[in-house]
Image: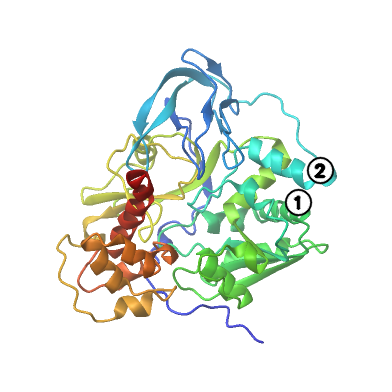
Amino acid sequence: MPLAFDFRHGVHPPEEKELTRELPIRRMPYPDELVLPLRQHAGKPAKLCVKVGDHVERGDTIAEADGFISVPIHASAAGTVTAVEFWPHPDGSYAEAVRIAVDKYAAQVPRPRIVPKWEGLTTEQVVKAVQQAGVVGLGGAAFPTHVKLAPPKEYAVHTLIINGAECEPYLTSDHRTMAEYPDRVLFGIRVMMHAMGVKKCVVGIEKNKPDAIAAMQRAVPKDLDVEILPLTVKYPQGAEKMLIKAVTGVEVPSGKLPVTVGVVVQNVGSVAAIAEVFETGLPLIERIVTVTGHGLNKPQNLIVPVGTKLRDLIAYCGGVTPDAAEVILGGPMMGTAVANLDAPVVKGTTGVVVLAKHETRGETVYPCIHCGRCLDACPVFLNPSHLGDLARVGRYDEMTDAHLADCMLCGSCAFVCPSNIPLAQLFQASKAALRRVPAVTT
């Protein structure tokens, strides 16, 4: 059956990628101080293994993985641990973090490392190497990558899908990674296919990235079954279930994971990070971040040390314009507004977007007019209007019955709402409230 390489519903927000899509990736200088939260990934936070006064080199472990669904945290630069304290986290909370005063005149050369030879490693050994390197999903979710390399044995995984859609407005870090480092991405794909025993891989890239598509097509090795697939430009194309539907035509059932239909999805940045582990032996201590927006003086694509404070990053990009109104971590559709610029870049920080006043929406919320636009936009066929009514009065159990769990907080409903109702935020708060219910009732 021919595929349309598309999915139903979704929206077309302004792309705003022209600010950085032609800008090559550059390295940011080390700041004077790094702040490394122990909670940077889904699962259990890492366990502290340094103390105040310790000197660390670039790549040294400062916190160890606490279980299988956890990864270690490593020093992004050589320096001295000055404090272990609660610090503003990008999610708006406070989290235990390690503060490191960066050695001003250090060469920032990591200690000598043994680079794993992937060809002779078993699946378990590859999984262990990737976990020890602290690699997580770099598309925003920050789920430990090694877990995806070892899917449950009861499911037969036949296809690896690499997510190069990058459908969020403004963000171009994945785009530039594919355009500038296609060989690295494909090496990471090779390691993943070897570890999982998968023979077929599809790299889905939206058609608005023709240079990335061309670069990846040129770099595909002849001995790998890797297809570079141009996709329809539509949001949220990069969501796992939407991408699987577009690429394979198969729909992942409600409440199920992609592995149940024989597919594993991995982000482009994460694949490149896996490649670096087996090229240099270095853990995940830096990442590519798009720093952009009409409220920023000098938008850029930068290699940023994990732990760099947002104020230092923005200052390096020339600071904000007089009409800057809001700083968002991630893209404007699924990202979160930042209240404190002392919060650091973490492993899951895909971008920093500084919006000018004219790019933000008004604060006035009007009553729902039941126009149905949110129903037409929702890619998982929910009724956001009904869910919003329930959320406003705290009827969370009824929201569960209305399939709130299927909502991926993509923000499509809020984007099209003429009443300016913050539906995605209401659903996010409702999910958090439901997670707290068992602790309250026991």
Q: Is residue 87 above or below residue 320?
A: above
Query: Which residue of the protein is positioned furthest toward the front in this rendering?
Result: 442
Residue 325 position within the rendered picture, expressed as x and y whole percent measured from the top left = 23, 51
From the viewer's side, name the closer residue of 209 and 430: 430
Q: What's the amino acid at mark 1? A: Ala
From the viewer's side, name the closer residue of 143 and 299: 143
Question: How far apart in space, not on screen, are marks 1 and 2 (Cα)?
Answer: 8 Å
Residue 285 position within the rendered picture, expressed as x and y whole percent measured from the top left = 56, 35
Which residue was labeled with disc 2?
121
From the viewer's side, name the closer residue of 267 and 45: 45
Q: Is residue 277 visible?
A: no
Which residue was labeled with disc 1?
195
- Residue 326 shown left or right of residue 35 in the figure: left
- Which quarter of the figure has residue 101? top left
Query: Which residue of the protein is positioned furthest toward the top in this rendering?
Result: 53
Q: Residues within 10 Å of mark 1 (few under 14, many from 20)?
A: many
Query: Which residue of the protein is positioned furthest toward the right in this rendering?
Result: 120
Residue in the image at 48% along x and 30% along y: 30
